[in-house]
Image (cartoon, rainbow, N blue to C red):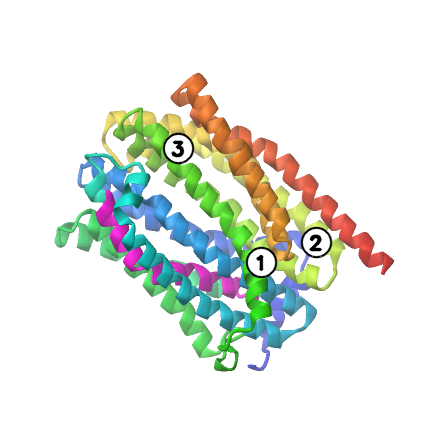
Amino acid sequence: MPKKDKGTDKRIYTLSEEKPARAVLKMGIPLIMGMFIMVLYNLVDTYFIGLTRDDYQLAAVNLAYPVMMVMVAVSNIVGTGASSLTARCLGAGDNEKARCTLTSGFMLTAFNSLIVTAAGLIFLPEIVRGLGAQENTFAYTEQYVRILLIGSIFTMGNYTFGQFLRSEGSVNYSIVGMIVGTLVNIALDPLFIFTFDMQVRGAALATVIGNGAGMAASVLFYLSGRTLLRPSVRFIAPRWKILGEIYRVGIPASLETLLSSAAFVVNNNLAVDYGELTVAAMGIAQKLLSLGNYIYQGFAAGTQPIMGYNYGAENYRRMKAVLRSGVAVVTCTEAAVMLVYGTMAPLLIGIFTDSDTVITIGAEVLRNIMFILPFVGAVSMCRMSFQAMGKPLYAFCITLVRQLMLYIPLLLLFNKLFGFKGMLKAQPVTEAVMMAVSLLLLYRFIKRSESRSADS
């Protein structure tokens, strides 16, 4: 293993001793900056497809989005499972097991991407119909999804390798892949869409190549020896105990994204009843909201290795302090973002389309769904903390209640009772309830763990 340098010492200090609020900011802000850039993957596609003045292609990009979410969900199985185990091993001082976990993560990422590509291409027509594509959007959606599936190794590798880097505290390295990938995507989108006249296929190809460039950047950090941990051929042979631990934590974690994808599909299928332009408008609003989503996701992902490290070190007092600081930071930040969305919704929607109908509907959607932001950050932080501690059943319970027992039933009920305006209010109501439930569950778990440690 490479000799530790000052950078390595600073990484461990941030996880173990830095003041809680400062540690949350130090780990979260670089991720948020990287995620703001990464969200341009979808916003740039939406922007350039919008310049074609073809609202059906614009709707197709939105309809295809759940496929990207499924890829992220499958990536989460390995990314979250391996990252959780790696952080806990580092906290317990077991660097050998941490390196073995990292190597297993690399191998599993490649294997899972092959499965996604093969299964997706075999069932492509059924997938496109299930996404809600109809006569005017079917061909465009199929073209976009086909290219995404062929390039799944790059999308999944870019996402997963960034998680591996964050698990050891190398946050700055992890965002380089996001930045590189997005810059490549921005450069290639107008070239493929307009110069080569590939239109929606060009947007998909630019996204895949951008992810490939981002993945390559992360791999280069490992090969250069700048990381705290490095994969090794010594650990290529499967170690079933480690694989079991990765999947034990990773599979429940991935269900959050899979269930979110299912909810997204239900949402789109309900929206289609109000017209395909409504689907296009909702797609723009949801992608704008993702800028706010990446703030809470960045803080939650940045807090995850801190919680995992300190759980491994049995430093429960620090865990509670980090949780309090994290929730305060993310809630205040999201309230500010919500103010911007509320005052500037039509202007923001108008960046992506000149259709008055789409702008009007999109502004209404954004001003309704933005109310999730003050609540959903705490929910995400609690769920990811349970994953970091290797307690997937708790994280799964949060996911199950949130998506299956609250959001999807409320979505269907509110749509039936109150129509389009009603379905927009289902998610804010869900997140407000889940914030209280999640914080109570996590705080009580940490206190019980602290009591058991004191008694032993």
Residue in front for this viewpoint, 131 or 24 = 131
Which residue is most to the right?
455
Query: Where is mark 3, residue-wise?
Result: 267
Type of the residue with mark 3 = Asn
Residue at 39% over, 53% down: 71
Residue 151 sits in which quadrant?
A: bottom left
Residue at 25% over, 34% down: 353
Q: Is residue 429 above or below residue 228?
A: above
**Residue 106 within the segment the image draws in magenta:** no
Please state the extent of the stretch shown in magenta in the rendering.
Answer: 141-170
Image quarter where the C terminus lies is: bottom right
How far apart are the two marked residues, 1 and 3, measured between alpha carbons?
A: 30 Å
How far apart are the two marked residues, 3 and 2, measured between alpha carbons?
A: 36 Å
Q: Is residue 75 above or below residue 401?
A: below
**239 to the left or right of 273:** right
Q: Earlier in the sequence, mark 3 or mark 2?
A: 3
